[in-house]
Image: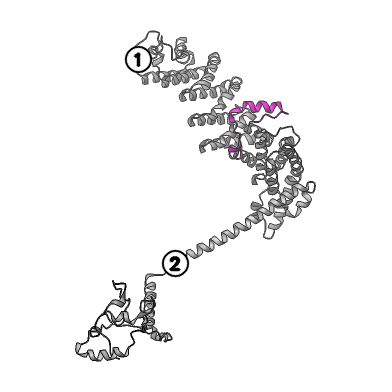
Amino acid sequence: MDTLTPFISRKKSRQLPEEDLAVKSLTIFKEFSQMFPESITQNVLVLLKSFVYTKNDDSNTNTSKVSLRLRAHAFASLGKISLLNRELGLELLPVLAKELLTSKEDMLRNNAVLILTEFCTRYTSIGDQYMPLITACFKDKRYIIRYQTITFLVSLLQEGYLLTKNTLLFCLLSTIIDKYETIQEIGKYGLSTLIFEKKKNIFLESFTEAVFVFNHYFPSDNQGQQQTVKDMEHFAIPGEDNREKRMQIYKFMITCMEEGSRGLLVSNISRDILNSVAEGVFPLDDVVKCMVRDCFAVLVSKEIRVFDSDSLAHELEDGEDERVAKAELEIRKAMLVQPIVPVMISLKNCVLEAKSDLLSDIVLFLKEILSDYKNEIEDILADDKMLKMQVLFEMRNESNQQEKEAKEKKNKEMRNAKKSVPPASGDHIGEKTKEISAYLIRRSVCPGDGNASAAGSNDVSLRLVPQTPQNRNLSHKSSGVLGDMDTNNDINMPSTSGVGPINVKDIMYSSTPRVLLKPLKLKSPNVSKITMRVDDLDIDEI
């Protein structure tokens, strides 16, 4: 008492007791009240109420110096005492509800929701009134508050303190799309193990209402469902962008259903939603369009099939797969195609009158459910030739697109196969380079030897022997040879570099050997002006 009194005293004090000591005192009060409830005096209750009820902006008290941690512990202590005092509990309930609605402090909201869930076990009739406030915490921004709330509610549901209502069902369904897997698992456990086991048809009976709730649509022909949608406004996830989240909920509900219930679900969707839109009960606004597209996605999903032919085929003997496939097609035709096609024809006429963009969705939906009945489309859609032509056109386009994609895939695989061929090794490249070089040199030196044998081509060698200048005394011999040469005529010889024939004149103007790899490039562009003596030429004798 002396530890806590300075915090709520009217006499302001600069020095307050340590917070840890005050928290320990509140914890002792909480535990002591459970063992000895009659020893809790009125003074203790007044002290605890002062922490809970007094506003923090009261300048006449020291409450402005009370920490959030201390106030949260005061809530928990007073809540524990209220479990043994009904009158105190009735007084505390509105305060807890207000904290849940207005408080921005996580610890206060967390303790408030825990106390309210405890009240559900002690005062069942009172707790049901505040159940919407508790379930609203499923959408709290803090993970710990969502986790605590779902854990306590599933425990109450397991112990039988809560009634299985549609509002509680939709709250638990919203946990399936929580970003934390732990909350998803707790919600799925409560739905599939606790709720579904008690009432097998609950998902079938609540499916169309779930479509209204999560799309936030108020059906004009059902007042009860309108109230449910209003109560569940906090859990709505409307819009085209949230369709994937809604589909996660729908698919979970379908997977929990029995096989017979899935066939009835098709009739419920067709009667309660699609037929109501076709008859004009639900005007074709954006929300209704979104609901219709949700229904199309559900009806073409693999979860709604009566049985899975793949799993059933493993249980049968060899040779019976074809019979299983035919049986599945017949069952699907009787339970999905035949009931839905007349509604689609009526819905198409309504969409044409309203000039809505749902017509393309209807055609694509029919293309999906009739893809296994291509030979029977003429009979199935005999009542609407225009719709039949549109469906067949979409099927042909899809077939052409698949063929094109298959061809592109094949070409891509061939290109990848060519790229995957390993490159030639370094030794192999070196050998090939030597062979090519030897061949080119041999052809340049000996042009007429192009038909040489293979053995000879493998042993090709060339030795370049430079010619030394001749003695000037032999110039008379050279002049005789030069006289026999017609300098006006060009004499060409093959080039070893592969760039074309080389003129003998170009060779004569240099002192390089006869076998040249590259002609000499002179600085002067006019070669005719160059003069030199015959003695300077180095010409081999013939």
The boundaries of the magenta stretch are 216-241
Q: Quadrant of residue 283?
A: top right
Farthest-out residue, right: 383
Rendered view: 371 above or below 281: below
Label 2 amino acid? Answer: Pro
Q: Secondary structure at mark 2?
A: loop
Q: Position of residue 410 (x, y in %)?
A: 57, 61
Between 21 and 343, the residue placed more toward the observer is: 343
Which badge, 2 or 1, is on the more N-terminal residue? 1
Between 199 and 104, the residue placed more toward the observer is: 104
Residue at the disc numbered 1: 16
Which mark is on residue 422? 2
Mark 2 residue crowding within 10 angstroms, few (<14) / some (14–19) / many (20+): few
Tell me, yes or no, if residue 102 can be seen here: yes
In the drawing, does residue 426 fall left or right of residue 394?
Answer: left
Q: Quadrant of the C terminus?
A: bottom left
Rendered view: 350 above or below 24: below
Q: Position of residue 28 (x, y in %)?
A: 42, 19
